[in-house]
Amino acid sequence: MDVDVDGRESFVIGVDYGTLSGRAVVVRISDGKELGSAVFDYPHAVVTEALPADTAGADAVRLPGEWALQVPNDYRDVLRHAVPAAIAQAAIDPAAVVGIATDFTACTMVPAKADGTPLNELPEFANRPHAYVKLWRHHAAQAQADRINELARERGETWLPRYGGLISSEWEFAKGLQLLEEDPETYAAMDRWVEAADWIVWQLCGKYVRNACTAGYKGIYQDGAYPSEGFLAALNPGFKDFVSAKLQHTIGRLGDAAGYLTAEAAAWTGLPEGIAVAVGNVDAHVTAPAAKAVEPGQLVAIMGTSTCHVMNGDELREVPGMCGVVDGGIVDGLWGYEAGQSGVGDIFGWFTKFGVPPEYHEAAALKGLDIHGYLTELASRQAIGQHGLIALDWHSGNRSVLVDHELSGTIVGQTLATRPEDTYRALLEATAFGTRTIVDAFRESGVPVKEFIVAGGLLKNPLLMQIYADVTGLPLSTIGSTQGPALGSAIHAAVAAGKYPDIRAAAAAMGSEPGAVYAPIAENVAAYDELFQEYRTLHDYFGRGANDVMHRLKAIQRNSTASLLATGVSA
């Protein structure tokens, strides 16, 4: 196998676009060794309260609740800053780089003109919220998602069971319908409704190629077709031509080259013009080959601000509440399953920011620990169940298996004796219970889960990893690489550059060996089984319609916010 250029070693670049930053990694093709990396934080981060003044002007409008936007030029800046910095750290000759690949959060949508220009970069749309990128965690399209689900059930749409019976408000069609109904002028001006995963590839190679992963999981593309014009017209007559007018594209197979690096993108990155640019991908799905988890039954959880669970299966099964099952959605020849939790690290971060008193932060500093490390140390001293709490991990809604972003977090059992470490541990456990709910749904639907592999930033917490092993009852291994998605993208870049015949071969040669391994402890498994039954009771009580209080509170909140905005009062 040829893995060199003019007798030299050759390299690829993987770029991982996360929620708050983008990371570039330089990887050697022959063995997957990571030689250099760099991170660029998005200057505008996540836009949730008001459009940024530097893009929208001094009179930038405020945003309603449940909105989450981003500024697309931040993504270009990752290419301008992180890629050259990673190459410099690796101390390689840029001429030895033969390919680049990217992965992205999903479903993150960019409204663009026919040449790829985002609408927010046009002066006439700079102060219109719907002209900006809608980040994956933009949940303001729940009403549209509800209508899509209801109509699909009424009509017996055959694609609905592929998504566990529910389409998420995070996904492409719900967000697109919201855009049409709330800002028809911006919708009319938009030529392309583009996944950010494909938009950044478009920026790199000058070609718009839709990746098979997001098309299948987030775009309701099944068996070679999107939902019909009749279905779309029944949602809203103006939505009838959404597919034909706004989604025109070719579908690119994962690992193929979408095109080749343009002169402009070469100038941004310092890379050679004309190298292969791989078809785009999703941060979670691209991590599976990085973890060498490309066979059926190997469940990979990419744990960060949220968690995405991906796994291959050799048979098509319909699993309630899943984010989707897609032919070739992870690797060719297998059915790729996806599930997820909308909030995990975000929940822990929220609690440490708003729920922990100053003296805890001071004590952590004295011990040379961050607040997460300090709370973990305190929580690890507890016996299972000692804190007397059960939490629901729905602070960002529920992605799987309920697929309802109107749900919210709760903690049951608090008393005047409850301390921050108690709540912190209960939140760690709640996210593990959420993952077990997903694992159980797979198993009950005939999709066996044999291994549990963790990637992402949260694998560094050993208490959390042991809790997950004990709650799921599965042996848990962590990926040895700290750059799972970026390494996975680099593996796809090597295939796109023709250095390996397919993803499986590239994963075998370039994938990461396991890091830490955690075995479930029998007595802990039994103790958590008892607590999990209590979690399931609360899960079904609040999540399956027995008590609709969370939805009612959301409605009250929206009405209150709308009233304040109508009177000109800051919400």
Image: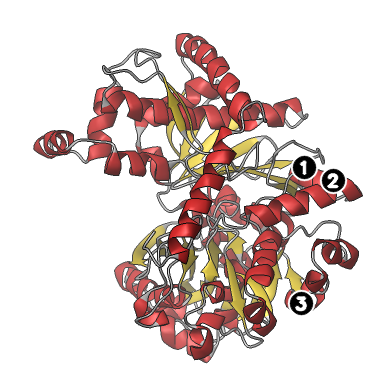
Residue 248 badge: 3
Residue 176 can be seen in this image: yes
In the image, what residue type sits under mark 1?
Gly
Whether residues under marks 1 and 2 lie with C-beta atoms below 8 angstroms apart, the answer is: yes
**Rendered residue at 69%/57% (across/down):** 144
Side (left or right) of 359 relative to 444: left
First along the sequence among labels 3 and 2: 2
Q: What is the spatial separation of the Cα atoms under label 3 and label 1, in whole angstroms?
A: 26 Å
- State which tag comes first along the sequence, 1 or 2: 2
The Cα atoms of the two marked residues, 1 and 2, are separated by 8 Å
Which residue is depicted at the point 9% across and 36% down? 366
What's the residue at 69%, 30% (across, down)? 441
Question: Would you name the residue on which mark 1 appears?
Answer: 165
Q: Position of residue 205 (x, y in %)?
A: 59, 82
- Residue type marked 3: Gln
Q: Nearer the viewer, mark 1 or mark 2?
A: 2
